[in-house]
């Protein structure tokens, strides 16, 4: 079974397009669930999702105020794990703005079913960021380098939302860290999750995938300065954790 966890903030123009893309690929969600976590949107994102009456098994999860993708993922993961009966069920995360290439999911799911605990859609391991500004691409590359260096994560793309997790590895993450599993509320949360799962010896694999920012209606929600501050906090904690670890 697959459970999708998709955070959304002010994406009323993109959510119908995302649902249409999913409708064209019923094998991805048949027998599963699609959780759209509305992160306190000030537009009609929640209303659009609530009014949906198509075939996709959509569940709307509402956060009353905007708290950032970290809190949205935490809320979505906890509900997804309640829905997953087995540790080899799969949890898929992706952007709500349609920049994730759903055609890549078959290969990602195959890797997860073959034993990978986390499968990353990688723009830096054969894929590319298309149509994004230099700041976005540069920040992504810098974050990947810094997190690999400080956390020892063997992965080239650490910040993309587009991933597949085995339910069992997410459960282990919450058992090991409880409420501290996702401390970063902003976009650095994805690198934080990856670092913590890596320290639990998760098998992490990457699939080359392009991220096409040109598919999005509206601006990216990523803010450069707050995101850089989030990565700085994250790296400081990771260095401190490695220094405390026994030799």
Image (tube, rainbow, N blue to C red):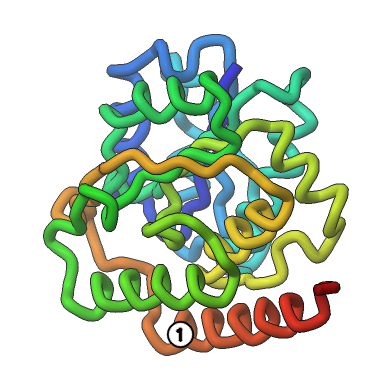
- Closer-to-camera residue (71/61): 71
- Closer-to-camera residue (105/153): 153
Describe the element under mark 1 as helix, strand or loop.
helix
Residue at x-position 33% and y-position 17%: 25
Asked which quadrant contains residue 108, the reply is top left
Residue at x-position 56% and y-position 76%: 150
- Closer-to-camera residue (78/49): 78
Residue bearing the label numbered 1: 228
Tell me where residue 17 appears, x and y as whole percent. Answer: 28, 37
Q: Quadrant of the C terminus?
A: bottom right
- In this picture, residue 157 sits left or right of residue 104: right
Position of residue 210 relative to residue 106, above or below, is below
Position of residue 56 relative to residue 136, above or below, is above
Tell me where residue 6 appears, x and y as whole percent. Answer: 51, 44
- In this picture, residue 114 sits left or right of residue 211: right
Residue at x-position 55% and y-position 52%: 38
Neighbours of disc 1 within 10 Å: few (<14), some (14-19), many (20+): some
Position of residue 28 relative to residue 59, above or below, is above
Tell me where residue 240 appears, x and y as whole percent. Answer: 73, 84
Tell me where residue 114 appears, x and y as whole percent. Answer: 52, 20
Q: Quadrant of the N terminus?
A: top right
Position of residue 223 relative to residue 122, above or below, is below
Residue 40 makes an appearance in the image: no
Residue 136 makes an appearance in the image: yes
């Amino acid at each position: 079974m697959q459970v999708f966890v998709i955070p959304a903030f002010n994406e009323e123009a993109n959510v119908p397009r995302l649902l249409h893309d999913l409708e064209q690929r019923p094998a991805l969600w048949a027998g599963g669930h699609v959780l759209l976590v509305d992160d306190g949107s000030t537009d009609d994102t929640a209303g659009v999702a609530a009014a949906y009456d198509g075939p996709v098994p959509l569940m709307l999860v509402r956060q009353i105020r905007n708290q950032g993708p970290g809190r949205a993922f935490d809320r979505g993961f906890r509900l997804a794990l309640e829905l997953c009966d087995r540790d080899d069920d799969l949890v898929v995360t992706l952007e709500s703005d349609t920049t994730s290439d759903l055609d890549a999911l078959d290969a990602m799911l195959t890797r997860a079913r073959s034993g990978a605990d986390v499968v990353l859609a990688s723009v830096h391991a054969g894929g590319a960021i298309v149509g994004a500004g230099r700041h976005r691409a540069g920040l992504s590359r810098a974050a990947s380098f810094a997190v690999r260096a400080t956390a020892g994560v063997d992965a080239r793309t650490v910040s993309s939302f587009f991933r597949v997790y085995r339910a069992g590895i997410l459960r282990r993450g919450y058992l090991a860290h409880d409420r501290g599993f996702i401390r970063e509320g902003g976009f650095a949360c994805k690198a934080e999750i990856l670092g913590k799962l890596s320290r639990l010896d998760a098998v992490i694999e990457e699939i080359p995938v392009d991220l096409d920012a040109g598919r999005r209606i509206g601006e990216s929600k990523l803010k450069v300065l707050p995101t850089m501050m989030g990565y700085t906090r994250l790296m400081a904690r990771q260095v401190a954790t490695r220094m405390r670890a026994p030799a």
